[in-house]
Amino acid sequence: MSEETKQHIKEKLLLVPNKPGSYQMKNKDGIIIYVGKAKNLKNRLKSYFTGTVTGKTAMLVNDIATFEYIVTSSELESLILEITLIKKYNPKYNILLKDDKSYPYIELTNENYPRLRVVRNVNRKKHKSRLFGPYPNVTSARKTVEMLGRMYPLRKCDRLKKDVCLYYHLGECLGYCKKEVNKDEINTMVDEITTFLKGDSSLLTKRIKDDMEKASKTMNYEKALELKNMLQDIEITLRHQKIDLNHNYNFDLFAYYNDKNFLSVQCFFIREGLLFGRHSDIIATLGNPEDELIEYIIKFYEKNSMLPKEIVVPSTLEQDLLAEYLGVKVSSPSRGDIKKLISMAQDNAKVALEEKEDLLKQNDEARLQALNELKELLHLEKVSRMEAFDNSHLFGTFYVGGMVVFEDFLPLKNEYRKYKISVDVKDDLGAMREVIYRRYFKVLMENLVKPDLIIMDGGENQVAVCKEIIDSLHLNIPILGLKKDEHHRTNILLNEKGEVLPCDPKSNLFIFLSKIQEEVHRYAITYHRTLRQKGSLASLLDMVPGIGEVRRKDLLRKFGSLKKMREASIDELAVVVGKEVAESLHKYLQEL
């Protein structure tokens, strides 16, 4: 942070009131990089610029050029404003959950002929089916559904077929499409499944033991062994549910442990008094740990989209604030079994952080060191957002491109992009030229955030092509090339002029750049492999820009085969996909 910036912030701090509100940190480009809330804005803002800061906080403070704040009349208003601004601006230093996947639930549908399936992104208020979960392990959820599906012959198909299917002949479906099924039999199965999913395995265990005995008596030893393995799976599942509160409690419990700018979070999912599963996370924090945990819990349920009826938290959290925002009961018992459970979760959070804290701290320090080294190497004032590119092809044909985005050497997977390359492109340089142009023309046209650095996975020619396109668009974005040796190991860094830059292969900078290179290479190859694995005809059509799943299905419905598509005129193809895409498709098909 420059002396001029320090003086500017010092003067602004004198004007901040001692009132509640939300504050927004901005970088030199005026972009909001962090949003927080405080009971006392003045005290909170001063805390960032006084004393020694380390890790993620040091990176934030170094990035701040100014700040703004909005005074509110209550703390709830501050929280609502904070979350609203975070959603709007997605600041780089606010909490990011590790992935965008929600936890799965097991759904027992409320239909005449019920089905059992694994679902995600459910909302309890809008959902009328019976839901059980969440299951932190999706494999466990699928395995449970598979096991129950074999023991209880519920409907397996989404829509009733015209005739009985293989499941009927295997004894895993009662043939609802053709047979008259007794409603009482269905209700009995539903009741037994519900009982098991609520934690009581006695009925299912008895059923499996009876079937196992029958299989043994008829010398069907393979079936008997299969059923024995099922029993073992059930025992293992129940063994993991070590906590039994002897009451039909249903709630999610959050606890935390905070140390040296790291917040360790533990969440226990309690269902019918049993520990159904748990979630743990460790995040770098910038503000008050209790405030950070409230933000974390809100984001957690936005991701999982399914709130429990009750949330239990430590007494240090503002329960009324969280309850009013989420619209559910939030409590913190001061004694009894649930209080002991909070203490257990806190102990787990502490152990988890102590196991990883040194590694996390070293990684933060290494990233900060690598960023500083990169700025010095390229003579840049700021390097945070990096976009890296690579191509993949099959024997010089069917090119695709991939772009990955890193911020301070951390991946932003939601911003990764895939590119289908025009069919007339036959070489790496042509493919890269198209991808770079498409990416940064869109950045210009849609006023998207520009990167601080473009990273090319290639030598002088790739860098030159990128530079040519960037200059033609009148953009000023530095370019870095990662060049491999004859053993396919990256050992040289190139600037946009093609000049070799000095960099120790054992340095933190080189290690982090290599990770970006590995990630973009993996991303491009995975995309290409995914297209190929969709099937021969599907993969061939998916290689054509402008053709996705919907248009591919429309083409197959219209023409029926690749041969008839190849014989069709551009006008005939255009009826399905439009003139421009039809021309590309026609040219592509003629060259197959």
Image: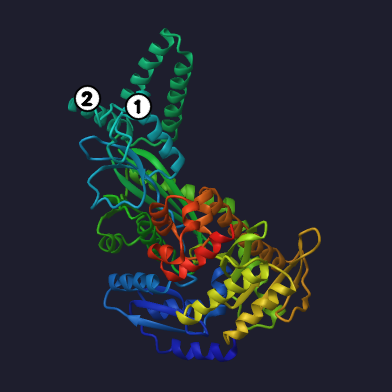
Q: Quadrant of residue 55?
A: bottom right
N-term mark: 2 or 1: 1
Horizontal side of 82 relative to 475 (left or right) equals: left
Looking at the rendered structure, the kind of residue marked 2 is: Glu
Which of the two marks, 2 or 1, is nearer to us in this view? 1
Mark 1 packing: few (<14 Cα in 10 Å), some, or many (20+)?
Answer: some
Residue 154 picture location, percent across and down: 29, 31
Q: Is residue 374 visible?
A: no
Q: Could you tell me which residue is drawn at 49 percent across and 57 percent down?
A: 567
Measured along the vertical axis of the image, is residue 579 above or below residue 496? above
> Which corner quadrant holds the C terminus?
bottom right
Question: Disc 1 on helix, strand or loop?
Answer: loop
Q: Which percent across, then down, holds residue 69? A: 38, 82
Q: Gap between marks 2 and 1, in whole Å?
A: 14 Å
Residue that badge 1 annotates: 172
**Which residue does the image show at 60% across and 85% down from the upper left?**
472
On screen, residue 587 above or below 1: above
| Front residue of this view, candidates 316 and 23 | 23
Residue farthest to the left, as pictured: 183
- Residue name at image x 39 percent, y 71 percent: 86
What residue occupies the far right of the structure in this picture?
486
336 versus 399 height, above or below: above
Identify residue for label 2.
185
Q: Secondary structure at mark 2?
A: helix
User: Please, which colouring scheme is shown?
Assistant: rainbow
Image quadrant in which you'd find residue 247: top left
Q: Position of residue 277 (x, y in %)?
A: 41, 42
Disc 1 marks a residue whose amino acid type is: Glu
The quadrant of the rendering that contains the N terminus is bottom right
Crowding at dot 2, Cα within 10 Å, few <14 / some 14-19 / many 20+, comes out as few
Location of residue 568 in the rendering, given as x and y in whole percent from the top left corner = 46, 59
